[in-house]
Amino acid sequence: MLEHLELFFRSIFVDNMVFAVFLGMCSYLAVSKKVSTAVGLGAAVIFVLGVTVPLNWLLDKYLLQDGALVWLGPEYADYDLSFLSFILFIATIATMVQLVEIVVEKFSPSLYNSLGIFLPLIAVNCAILGGSLFMQTREIPNIGLALNYGVSSGIGWFLAILAIAAIREKIRYSNVPAPLRGLGITFIITGLMGIGFQSFGGMLTGDNEPPEETQNTTVETKEDKEIKKEIDDTEKAVSYNEAVNK
Amino acid sequence: MALLSKKDANLIKDPLADNNPITIQVLGICSALAITAELKASVVMAVSVLFVLGVGNVVISLIRNIIPAKIRIIVQLVVVASLVIIVDQVLKAFAYELSKTLSVFVGLIITNCIIMGRFEAFALGNGPWKSFLDGIGNALGYGVILVIVGFFRELLGSGTLFGMKVLGDPVTKTGLYSIGYENNGFMIIPPAALIVVGIIIWVQRSRNRELIEEA
């Protein structure tokens, strides 16, 4: 139970899809002009992530991992098909999105009307494939956690796009320098929001290691800076995996 | 450029500046931001996208007349995914450390909007040679921004370029550090990339005021 809670809050706040790893930025920037459309796309992302991450977890576990084919018989134990994961994951996502679209259209026309137009967009949203790939590299241990990870990353993405859409609706009345209008100011606001979200790094202090995110803002001695720099250089990209495994 | 007609040359030149995929078309932001803390990773990412987009555009252009319109997205995804698998395997074989740094972002080239965007907007309606030039041009435009962001973030954040200490040694206090210069840790954290790109957009649109968006 505790690990579920920890993963849930970590995925929403600490490893937020938009602010920490920049996934799904394209649709985040393109569809955030109005709050109502942002809510529709956000809901669709939560839904699709919640479906595809557990499915891809099953694929990864029983088909792709080193030795995953052992359930077919001992002679298959040596196969490592992990190089195929990109193509299988994206195929799962594309078919699932299509399938979800058909099912929703048939059984819930009202939901289809609000989500429908966003679903085809989602097949090529990096947040969806990113969710599955991070699930794979972080070695999420069971399908319950995979489902949790999918849904909570989706919620994190939803919060981000909701927030920026609300800000962009308000900023229309502000006097932004002309060259920054539109895209430029959105980038900078997202950056500032990202810095704000970094403060959540200290939220889950059950770990033994100090969260890297907050180190940058504290005053340190020279030695600390050096150590921190090395950590940053070498482990920046893998730190997310470690953090979740801990 | 004597080989190319003026129109063909524009296919390469336009995306480098006034029709840049990142700052103007707003495509392919995801990977552009996450891996630019170091210059080396940025360059490798740019080259990978160059390969995938160049080859992918040609392949899609060659088969554009036999793809059924309804399933074209899936066909495109399969083409990109196969090319990305090649890139990923090559990186794992020859630059293992780097492929660790890039982690999932190599795989995310598949969903890089630049690639799907160029397939849809250009390769499906043009011949292979033009598509190839368009692919190269857009990938270069993407690469330029990546390298600029990577350059500033690594230089200001760690005081290095390609891992070499160009500003002196911060421990022994040589070079710039001897007069009290400090690295800016802020540039290393992810949100800094967004702000750097925002500033690039600002500079570009101040220079060419036609690009300014309507309020």
Image (cartoon, rainbow, N blue to C red):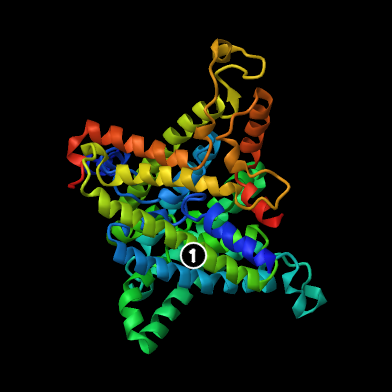
Dividing the picture into quadrants, the one containing residue A222 is: top right
Looking at the image, the residue that sits furthest to the bottom is A107
Residue B99's spot in the image, x, y percent? Answer: 61, 46
Which element type, helix, strand or loop, lies under badge 1?
Answer: helix
The answer to whether B46 is drawn above or below residue B112 in the figure is above
User: With B59 as the anchor, is B45 left or right in this view?
Assistant: right
At 50% from the left and 33% from the top, the residue drawn is B187
What chain letter is assigned to the residue under label 1? A
The answer to whether A158 is drawn above or below residue A218 in the figure is below
Q: How crowded is mark 1: few (under 14 residues within 10 Å), some or many (20 or more)?
A: many
Nearer to us in this view, B21 or A221: A221
The answer to whether B126 is drawn above or below residue B94 in the figure is below
Query: What residue is disc 1 on?
Result: A154
Whether residue B57 is visible here, answered yes or no, is no
At 54% from the left and 10% from the top, the residue drawn is B179
Residue A100's spot in the image, x, y percent? Answer: 44, 79
Residue A133's spot in the image, x, y percent? Answer: 58, 60
